[in-house]
Amino acid sequence: MPETSRRVALLLNLAHALDHLFLLIFATAVAAIAADFGFARWEDVMPYSVGAFAMFGLGSLPAGKLGDSWGRRPMMLVFFFGLGGSALLAAATQTVWQLAAALALLGAFASIYHPVGIPMLVQGAKKPGATIGVNGLSGNLGLAAAALLTGFLVQALGWRAAFALPGLVCISLGFVFARLVPAEAEPPSRRSRPAAVALSPAQLARVLAVMTVASATASLLFNLTTNGNGRLLAERFAGVVSDPATLGGLLAGVYAVASLAQVVVGRLLDRVPLKRLQMTIVLAQAPLLAAASQAQGWWLYAALLGVMILIFGAIPFTDAVIVRYVDDRMRSRVAGLRLTLSLGFSSLAVWALGPVVKASGFGTLLMAMAGIALCTAAALLALPAESGARRAQG
């Protein structure tokens, strides 16, 4: 379609919020789930969610291929109905292994959004950086909603309602999407919309390799923080705040404020060389993570806010690279391959989170995350300079 209409953009941004909301429900409600299934510690239940994040990565490759060859609109319908249905299934489970299977299914449907929804959103966009920034804001507001909404639902109605009610909302939005979004005249693979900046095959391969590595390490930080922040606040606020709903509100505030970083970064991406901007953000992550490793109470809250601003601020870069350097006919496939590799690798973070915290504590984990941030910066050194990319266009 031509430039995405406002109503389609609104629905796609809402879909991004739901995508991240569903992936965080388990981590936010894990203490209640552990108690319900008879586990003494939340850390022992956390590894059961690894299937969701593994499928979130592995499912991106077939989702991207189908998005280009079958169409992005029908794949988004599968997303809405599949994600909502799997959430209802999770709410109905009776054993922890049944829940693990339902979460893996949920992750498979959640994997559709990034390789399909984002290319659908930016196709024909005049300012793709700004569009990606607003979309990133929407996704991370989904994280804030998960922290806030799940805390209240768990307290008022139990953890099953925290899955069921958003599931019903997701299915309802699927019907709205089917009604309001027109059918595509042809699948993206048959259209011709060249990349904004032309690169030689060797240059393109180098850029995508660097961004896949950087995306994998950045995704590790994203998964470790978003899945661990709830329990980190509960531990470091002991004696200060103990009410789950209040802690959820505090965490939602962190995510809401940090989400604004994506709007700022998105606008900067249309004006500032990509490599310089990304390096600045990534290098700033390490000292703040180190500070958070030692902080308690409100000092921890301040450090965590800074950490999440920088982690969220780094998110738009990979999508910006794909929009800038990859032809629209194959953007979903390229995004799907990148996500399969990076998110499949970073899903290990969810599996390791509980055991690492149980064995060594959050302080050690946060220091290790500072090292991961430095690895991301090292990978970015191999990214070609922006000026070189523009010369390649000519």
Image (cartoon, rainbow, N blue to C red):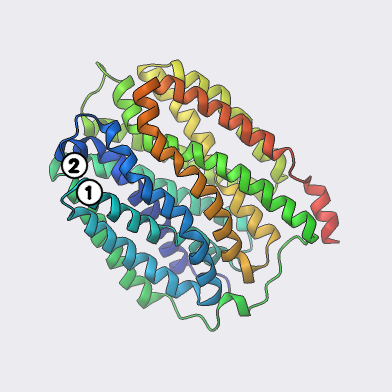
Residue occupying the point 56% across, 44% down: 216
SS at badge 2 = helix
Residue occupying the point 73% across, 55% down: 205
Q: Is residue 351 left or right of residue 217?
A: left
Are there few (<14), some (14-19), or many (20+) residues within 10 Å of tag 2?
A: many
Check the picture and name the quadrant holding the N terminus: bottom right
CA gap, disc 2 and disc 1: 6 Å
> Residue 280 bears which disc, if any?
none
Inspect the image, locate mark 2, and give the three-letter code of the amino acid beneath it: Val
Quadrant of residue 194 within the rendered picture: bottom right
Report if residue 379 is visible in the image. Answer: yes
Inspect the image, locate mark 1, and give the three-letter code of the amino acid beneath it: Ala
Residue ranking furthest to the bottom: 185
Q: Position of residue 365 (x, y in %)?
A: 45, 25
Q: Are marks 2 and 1 in contact (CB under 8 Å)?
A: yes
Above or below for 269 versus 39: below
> Residue 162 bears which disc, if any?
1
Residue carrying label 2: 154
Q: Is residue 332 left or right of residue 143?
A: right
